[in-house]
Image (tube, rainbow, N blue to C red):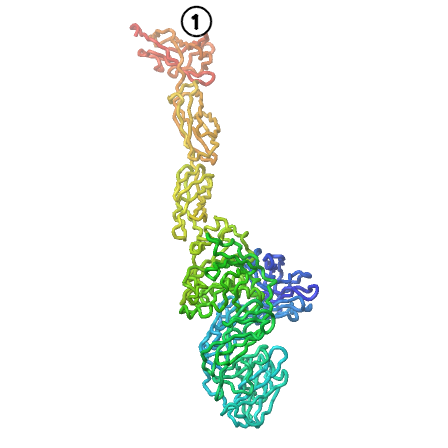
Amino acid sequence: MRISELHYDNAGTDAGEAIEISGPAGTLLGGWSIVLYNGADSLAYNTTQLSGSIPATCGTRGVVVVNYPVNGIQNGSPDGIALVDPSNSVVEFLSYEGKFSAKNGPASGTQSTDIGVLENGSGAIGLSLQLLTDGWSGPSASTFGACNDQDAVITGPIDIITVTPNPSTIATTATQQFVAAASDAAGTPVTGAALTWTSDATGVATVDANGLATPKAVGDATITATAANGVFGSAVLHVQQPTTELPHTRFSEIHYDNAGTDAGEAIEIEGPAGQSLSGWSIVLYDGNGGGAYNTTTLSGSIPATCAARGVIVMNYPVNGIQNGSPDGFALVDDAGHVVEFLSYEGTFTAVGGPASGKTSTDIGTSENSSPIGQSLQRDASGMWSLLPATFGLCNPAGSTPGNIVTFSGRAAVSDPPLPIGFEAQLFATLKNGATTLTTTFTWTSETPAIASVDQNGVIRALAAGTATFRATAGDGTTGRISLPTTDAKASTTALYGHNTEFGTPVDADPSDDFIVARSEYTLSYNKNRGTPNWVSYGIDSTDFGDQDRCDCFTFDPALPASFTHLTTADYTGAGAAAGYSIDRGHMVRSFDRTSESLDNARTFYLSNVAPQASDLNQGPWAVLETFLGDQARLQNKEVYVIAGVAGNKGTVKNEGKIVIPASTWKVALIMPHGGSFADVHGIGDVQVVAVNMPNEPGVRNVDWHTYQTTVDAIEALTGYDLLSRLPDNIEIPLEANDHAPSARIAGAAAGSEGTPMSFIGTSSTDTDPGDVLTYSWEFGDGRTDVGSTPVHTFLDNGAYTVKLTVTDRFGLASSATTTVTVANVAPVPRLASASGSLVATSGIPFGIIGTFSDAGVADAPWGYTITWGDGNTPTGQTSDMRARIDASNTYRRAGTYSVTFSVTDKDASTGMSQLSVNVLRRRVTAMAQPGMINLNDRGQGGVDVVLLSRLGFDATQLVPASATIGGVPLDTHGDDDKLSYHVEDANGDGFLDVKLRFSRAALIEAGALSPTSTELVLLADLLDGTQIEGHATVQTKTPGGPK
């Protein structure tokens, strides 16, 4: 499933906007969606739900088209499209006119892939961008609804680049075409990838944007192709002298292009004096197509211009020789053989004419609007150079070559025009053939209104135009070089203004800090060092463009005139004096200011430069610069940088002007695009990179990460407070490169309320050496503690979230949580008799005292129940665990009762306590009548027992039927079987008593009355159920007398 076609912009009002989805035929689209993203704020602005299924448009695959209203799809710069599957996973996140990272929706946090083509709003209606078999293409005629990507290969990011041939060897007179093959991590070729070609030794060989290498001198160069994501591949090129001799008769000089209307175009041929040229010819070839466009027939003989050899010159009309890129010229002898087939500005294969099928040899140099009076000349080694024209004279390959002056340091062809107010240095060399002669030069400007020159060859542009300089050697040999100058322009697109976003660095001694603030950067210049103390600047994607490197090192005009005036010449020869190569090292990289010419030129102010060992400047320092720049340029980041110097290794050339630092340092803060100081709320909001690199030779191949350090260390080294705007709670850990600890909880995971539980935080870790952690606990019950191994008692059951927060010495903290299950514990009741006795009396209240405890002190309210054992079960409730429950019960029936006191907490857990109560009959006063009972005649007659009433006891409440003595009930009247008793005040105390009549015979028979009896025990119930007993004292007698 993939996005296969898109139309979002056309001339006039947008129309026919649509997105096409390609996938396997039959795929159900329910749950799939297309989400449109706005690259300006990185937020989703439209979601379209898909439905149905993909038809079999083209065999096993098919397409569906989603149409949008007028201007329904935004016009980019950039915007994006996400294809989202039913699980809400992003299948594809593409963008046009740039890349960005989504901030919300299903693609949140994902960086888009730029399809690499766009609609610029000028195209006709009916065009679209299409995914073809080799990637995205267009705009071209739309094919919505038809398959256009059946065999498209979808590749990942470039992972490998292979450059071939590797190695290769060429002569100084040849060129080498390199080819780079890119592939992703799966080995799938990535076609059409934009690659940048570079040479690490441009003095040996240069390479153009298409991988064509042109030799400059004998030696070795590494040719590298680099992708936009930083992946690169390299090949080694060995340049050697030609292995074959040059033709005896050959081309020796050509002029084909100059500034303005071409003039003086000519070709010179050199050969043995007297050589007949009858039948020879010069054939000019057009490199675009390969055909011949002019043939000049030669005649006569070569004169003895320089003894045994000579030259002839063929002049051409204005614009008679084409200006290349590429074009060529062939020397053909009288037999039609091609003696030489040379070209300039590239190679090609001739089509037709005498050189048909032959590939030209690039002479390795060119004229790019050079001044009139210049030409390309061949020397004794076969090397071609741009020099003052000498048509008609033998070059330094003839029999008696003369001295010539050559120039280096700056060239009209390879360097941009020198901006007004900026400087560069030219170097002149006196040569005789291949031999370099020792001499001195006198410099003059032939265009003093346009540019000046001092005797060190330092030139300064004064006005726009073409500046011409002359160098005259001690022997009078002179040479001229012309260079363009221009009025540099400031960028209108770069977003500057945040150079000191996190504070202006300050130290304890401001006397050596001269602050220069300009839009591109802010710096502190130290007049005592001749270098900056520090340079502070920001980088974002708007800072980059296509401007060439100015190479115009100049004293900063913002510095006071009283400061030592430096020029680039003050650095020249630094390496020779130090014993190792030294560069003019930028603090703000030149490439980070390429949106316009003036922006780039200002990075070459010497106030932005310090002496750096070449191995450092071109090694880890350069790699770090590339990393930081790519964060802004390719990764859509905002980067804030402070770079500076530290230490003292002496001065450049021991002249006391420029201090060579012992190290150079850099602090970078990386944030999302548009991020600023206001967006930093914690150390996680910004990435910090801090390095301090030794300014030494031999470090070229050291990984820059080796030199990573802390901001604290750099501040201690330099004395500067670098991030002063940050609040201390962020600045302190950020500058220490502190990392938050990792909290971990061990110990009890379950327990019971009221029971101490142990927790352990000592397994928490911190990757920072020497950090001491503090421990803070929250137990989820509203209580807290500190320490690494606390013991905590939960007062109630439940599931508690226990949180541990560990904090390091810089205040950074992290937390961990665990769930602890706390079980409920039943209350523990305690039951006691109020009187201390477990014996109760029927009819008399029996009191108890109930108390309880509960490990879960938060288990209120508690309900309680008292079970008296006689069917009486009162209940109650209390919220006070200290409460005393006082209760009583009046037992009516004698016996043994189990009394239970149970307490139930709010979680329905119950505890109980029991005691056993022995309930006795109530003892009342009774007397027998008569007191002396005659047992003779087997006890004929009755015995009366009188129950006496007293205060608190009413004998009249007796239930007569319940009265027994020894199991013998009341006697009955003989005439009506009524129980024999009656009520009377038997003792005259004013209370009515009850007299009960029992059968003496029955008592004797039951054994309740015997000769040994001393009392009769009456058992009875009262009306209220109270059981009583009365003990009546008796004496018995038998026929033998009283017993």
In the visual, does 77 lie left or right of 612? right
Which residue of the protein is positioned furthest toward the left in this rendering? 1040
Say which quarter of the image contains residue 142. Answer: bottom right
* Quadrant of the snapshot with the C terminus: top left
Question: As rendered, which of 851 and 40 lies closer to the eye?
Answer: 40
At x 56%, y 64%, the residue is 599
* Quadrant of the snapshot with the N terminus: bottom right
| Above or below, comparing residue 958 to residue 144 in the picture | above
Q: Is residue 151 visible?
A: no
Question: As rendered, which of 369 and 709 lies closer to the eye?
Answer: 369
- Residue 153 is situated, as x and y percent measured from the top left of the image, at 55, 70
Which residue of the protein is positioned furthest toward the top in this rendering? 988
| Above or below, comparing residue 933 to residue 901 in the picture | above
Mark 1: give few (<14), some (14-19) or many (20+) Cα within 10 Å. few
Q: Is residue 275 visible?
A: yes
- Residue 700 is situated, as x and y percent measured from the top left of the image, at 43, 67
Question: As rendered, which of 85 and 662 lies closer to the eye?
Answer: 662
- Which residue is label 1 attached to? 988
- Residue 106 is situated, as x and y percent measured from the top left of the image, at 56, 57
Element class at badge 1: loop
Count of numbered circles on the image: 1
Question: As rendered, which of 26 and 228 lies closer to the eye?
Answer: 228
Q: Amino acid at mark 1?
A: Gly
- Residue 6 is situated, as x and y percent measured from the top left of the image, at 63, 66
